[in-house]
Amino acid sequence: MNTAIDYQQLQRQYELEVYPKRDVTFVRGEGCRVWDDTGKEYLDCAAGHGVANVGHCNPAVVEAIREQAGKLITCPGTYYNDAKAQLVEKLASIAPDGLNRSFLCNSGAESIEAAIKFARATTGRTNFVCANRSFHGRTLGALSATFNHAYKEPFEPLVAGFEFVSYNNIDALAAAVTKDTAAVILEPVQGEGGVHIGDHAYLQAARRICDDTGALLILDEIQTGFCRTGRMFASMHAGATADMMCTAKAIAGGLPMGAVVCGDRVEISIGSHGSTFGGNPLCCAAANAAIDYMIDHRLDEQAASLGENLVRRLSERNLSKVREIRGIGLMIGIELRTKARPFVMQLLEEGIITLPTGATVIRLLPPLTITKDEINHLEQRLVNVLH
Ligand SMILES: *Cc1c(COP(=O)(O)O)cnc(C)c1O
């Protein structure tokens, strides 16, 4: 590798830092593995923060990007495009019944922003009910729907009209939603909040409460979508269908993209929203290839069985440092009795990439293409560190 250039020094000098950095420079990825500039190999059990569901540099995605890059990279939303037509049809075919028209954008936060605007435009109402521990992104609208006070406080005043109630509490939700509520915004499984799984009865009740009051239901499937939890979308476990389903992260095999998949109630007038890059042919082609790969390789079933196995095996070990393990598919939170960060750092040292969430939870979001051998290796390392 090139040791003549100190990339970390360049970034320390020239990057406006917003991230707590780890001391590693990644230069290559393939499947579940990534390599740093010294040639050290890592098992990426975070999949680039839940993005690489089909693995890093999935050959089908790489080929689709190469081919589309040679044909057409950019095309404004004011024109029709073949790759985009195929993608919006595909999204309708894999989304829960009733969600059949998509707005395409470039990130998770952008999909939440769009859903907030669409909800206000559709209902003529201003207010939103969100959950404690929620995370919906870092832009001002998405931040307004996010619970963590530390993320919000430096940037106030945020968008007005957002209220928070405890998650998985049907009575609290019913009490908060009124005739002024434009939408309820929920994650079917709270990821950043520590991997808390929404009860089926809770998500079904959210649907009912919205129907009773005329509010819309926005489900944030940005992290839970695209087979992560063992179904194409996590809300399918509960059979609770949103009016708007926000997606991003894994949608385009690693390229930046988001989509709001909408039901019939959603109305937005022409000219009232848009995005220069949203739904560009390059990202659409990558998304088409990534989604086809998920379907063809049954990554939903793969995530369900591998995840269930891993959680059971780890639970059977009665690891002394572990308080509780919560998991659905390959979205797993290991809650420790002490702070998670030192263990995340130790695992990184040993070549295993995980994510801390909250103070005490180690989050696992590996590529859904992870092999049995790779899962066994992960289990070994976790047992070593957490016994
Ligand atoms: C990552 C994430 C977001 C924000 O997505 P960005 O692409 O980082 O803007 C929103 N909601 C959930 C549930 C997420 O996991």
Image (cartoon, rainbow, N blue to C red):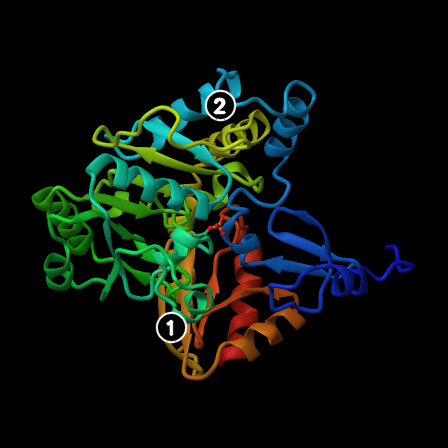
Q: Tag 1: residue type?
A: Glu
Q: Give the camera-side residue of 339 and 209.
A: 209
Residue highlighted by disc 2:
77
Q: Give the camera-side residue of 158 and 386.
A: 158
Which disc is residue 40 wearing?
none
Which disc is residue 316 wearing?
1
Q: Give the camera-side residue of 203 and 10.
A: 10
The residue located at (60%, 51%) in the rendering is: 32
Residue 385, image x, y percentages: 55, 78
Q: Tag 2: residue type?
A: Gly
Residue 205, image x, y percentages: 13, 51
Residue 311, image x, y percentages: 39, 64
Given this view, does label 1 or label 2 mark the residue nearer the observer? 2
Q: Is residue 227 left or right of residue 99?
A: right
Farthest residue to the right: give it.
Answer: 4
Figure disc tally? 2
Q: Is residue 318 left or right of residue 198?
A: right
Please identify the quarter of the rendering in which residue 44 is found: bottom right
- Quadrant that contains the N terminus: bottom right
* Disc 1 to disc 2: CB gap under 8 Å: no
